[in-house]
Amino acid sequence: MSKINFLKPDKSNLYTFLYLGSFLFFVSVLDVLLNSFFSLNLTGFLPGFLSFLLPLILGFIGLYFIRIELSGIKQLDLLNKHINTNNFNAVLSLLIIFIILKSIPPILSWFFIDASFAGDSKDVCTGTGACWTYIKVWMRRFMYGMYPNGEQWRINLSFIALALLGSVGYFATDRFKKYLTLYYVVIYPFIAFLFIFFFISGGPVFFDFSYGIIAAILSIIIGFFIPNRLKFYYFLIVPFALYVLLKYFIFYEELIELGKLDGLNWVETGAWGGLSLTFIISFFCLIFCFPIGMAFALGRRSGFPLIRYISIGFIEFWRGVPLITVLFMSAVMFPMFLPADFFIDKLVRCIIAISLFEAAYVAEVIRGGLQALPRGQYEAAKSLGMGYWRMHIFVILPQALKLVIPGIANTFLALVKDTPLIFVVGLLEIVGMLNLAKTNPEWLGFAMEGYVFAAIIFWIICYAMSKYSYNLEQKYKTDR
Amino acid sequence: MNFKLKDIGPQLMTVIAVVLVFGFFTYNAQVNMENRGIDFGYGFLSQESSFDVQFSLIEYDGSHSYFRAYLVGLLNTILVSVIGIILATILGVLVGIARLSPNYLINKFAAFYVEFFRNIPLLLQIFFWYFAALRALPLPQDAEAMFGISFLTIKGLFVPAFIWENFNIFFYSVVAAIIAIVVIRIQAKKIQETQGKQTPVLLISIGLILILPLLSFLIGGVRLSFEVPVLKQLATTSFIYEGGVSLPPELIALALSLSLYTATFIAECVRAGIQGVGKGQKEAAASIGLTPNQVLKLVVMPQALRIIIPPTTNQYLNLTKNSSLAAAIAYPDLVLVFAGTALMQTGKAIEIVSITMFTYLSLSISISLLMNWYNNKIAITEK
């Protein structure tokens, strides 16, 4: 019992080694702690190199001593199992503990203790810490870009309204649940578009929906007399034809007058910016890229060779080029492809470009889901007499989309992270605004604060999105 | 041929729509170019470019042609992609393995790294490293030498250059070593299959790759010397290192952020791949008497690689495409040199953007073909 084996700590001399090991471990951690928090060097009397390595050596010996299997002490066993399984792991654990201890004080002091929060000019930022005053002063620019200060309530109001309208799904009663898909796919994006168009953009509005409305009503009325077999082709062609007919051959000046409205002060899209622009672009690209991607996923698995090849070409083209060249294309090449008098706003071109780009990725993700479904699902649906569209809408897509929730979420995350690239066409969302603010002669030298601020915001958004997608995945997980 | 309206209708409509859209675009492009007096053609590629590029792997100045400028940009893109891919793979594999460690601290540390770098836009990270972190480096005259020979300064990293004598002999010795290793591997596999004997291939390979080049130094007359960068004064307050190899800060920032960002994704691929190998496989391998190293080498890794390779290929492609963000910090890559400066000078928007896109397309396709070939080679051949 009293025989002490110095080289092999085991259960027979548990307490000797436990106390000795814990003490050594404690001393090593304490040394680093004092060193980093109070810049005291306990081992300063030793030569530099040894003093530097001493905590590691002490901690290593300590951990070696307390590595006693089946000691019977619950905490010790847990500790050994988790951070102290063998020598290599012990060294790594020690290193990580030391790195954390060492990095806490400088980070804390930069973020909070030495940082300046008060005031509204550069003069208050004299400390060695961060200058959050800079962020405070530029906050409106980072959030709203060059949008006039007096008009920013329009953005806030639109976003709040859209957020409220978007949360309708949580409060819907069972009676309305079945309309939710329709609401989110058609009505909600339309409302959002109206908000952006009339509220955030503003300006006198001239819309000749009048012709469109007449064309739609007329074609629906005629549609009742068309046999079911041809309805698809009918609705593909006739409303558009009627619209063109009305617009170019029948002139209703009164209807045009009806469509004229004086809106709010017009704010051109060049002045939009900051985080709100990130949201606007992400929102619309998200809405557009999903149906386009779904269409091309179905097209790639279509039985018609021509449609298949066109889809493959589309998908592989967009997947093969970087987004930055796509945006270049939308900026310098796309205007060449349009009639000279035809103008598309820069922001709209951007949204189209990003949507097409991300749609290719969404298409590949959805194709993965379609391929993962067993053939039996297709055959069962066909044997029930379902056609192509019915089969896909009621049987295939609900299952396939459920399978690919993580993939789609990743694509959307990539989309949000790609939005800063719009600096290529001269639109400045939050990262672009940071670069602009950084070069302001009155506020030179605060690049770090700005980037850290934007990084925190993006991190919160992306992390929340990935957690949400994980929840969705768990919610819709069905054992198959 | 069976002409059914049901089959032909949708296809015909799609094709007509595509043709109409393309026709519309082409027609407009023609009209627009006529109006603006621009002619279409790739002849400008041989003209004198008359702009300079800060950093290039091949000899280049304003008197060279636009085509050479294109090559400069392309080589710079490939350089940063290759550096990024190598660093990201090393880091990603390490972090991926760390994510599976039983050690709680290592595991959480790796998880923190992945969650942190993955959720911040790459462009922001590039800006952070370039404009904030690397700007905190010392000026050339204040820099302390690393290992006495390299200098990390605000103007870039200066490392010694290798000066070779009889480089070709050294090169041939390395090639010979690689050929010998391949031959030995094939032989070892044959011996394993016919006689069931294991050959220490790894040891022999390491020995060969060390000894043959060493021999070339000893008897082949190969000499290697270093040219250490030396501080030189340009003006009263402006210093720069001369001699050696200089890596511009743009390259460092770009390679660093690309590899830190992509490594998170590769780490997740590696983790998923190793986790994807069933526990039973390892137990079965251990039960027929393989050592832990053999289990890893012969059973786990071949199966894990099959899961890891396809998504990792995607990440390599993403990294290559993301290297185009270089334009944001003025690293002279393909987009900046060609789609930026050259486009501004010539105004040939359609030609230049199409060449740029086509280049990236072919880069992507060649990487994915290469990896597909490798993937097919290691895929399970089902009977």
Image: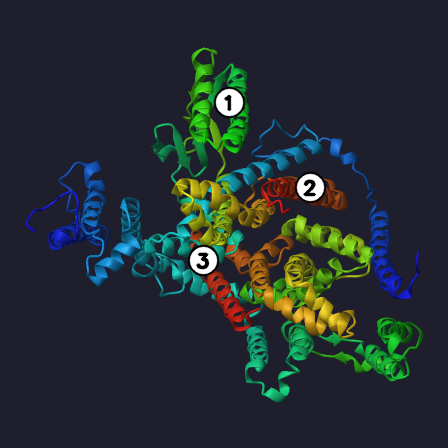
Q: Distance from label 2 to label 3 (Cα)? A: 32 Å
Q: State which tag comes first along the sequence, 2 or 3.
A: 3
First in sequence: mark 1 vs mark 2: 1
Residue A105 appears in the figure: no
Q: Residues within 10 Å of mark 1 (few under 14, many from 20)?
A: many
Q: Secondary structure at mark 3?
A: helix
Residue appearing at x 57%, y 75% in the figure: A159
Tag 2 residue: B362
Please name the residue that numbered disc 1 is placed on: B177
- Which color scheme does this rendered protein use? rainbow
> Helix or strand or loop: what does disc 2 sit on?
helix
The residue marked by circle 3 belongs to what chain? B
Of A343 and B207, nearer the camera is B207
Comparing labels 1 and 2, the label whose residue is closer to the camera: 1
Left or right placement of residue A365 versus residue A206 in this view: left
Q: Gap in Å between the C-alphas at discs 3 and 1?
A: 42 Å
Q: Report which quarter residue A151 is drawn in.
A: bottom right
What chain letter is assigned to the residue under label 2?
B
Q: How far apart, in angstroms, are the residues tagged by discs 1 and 2?
A: 32 Å
Q: Which mark is residue A449?
A: none
Residue B115 tag number: 3
Between B30 and B36, the one nearer to me in the picture = B30
Amino acid at dot 3: Glu
Say yes or no: labels 3 and 1 on the same chain: yes
**Do callouts 2 and 3 mark residues in contact (Cβ within 8 Å)?**
no
**Callout 1: helix, strand or loop?**
helix
Please tell me which residue is depicted at 52% across the width and 17% down the height of the picture: B167
Discs 2 and 3 carry the same chain letter: yes
The numbered mark 1 sits on a residue in which chain? Answer: B
Q: Position of residue A480 (x, y in %)?
A: 58, 68
Residue type at mark 1? Ala
Q: How many marks?
A: 3
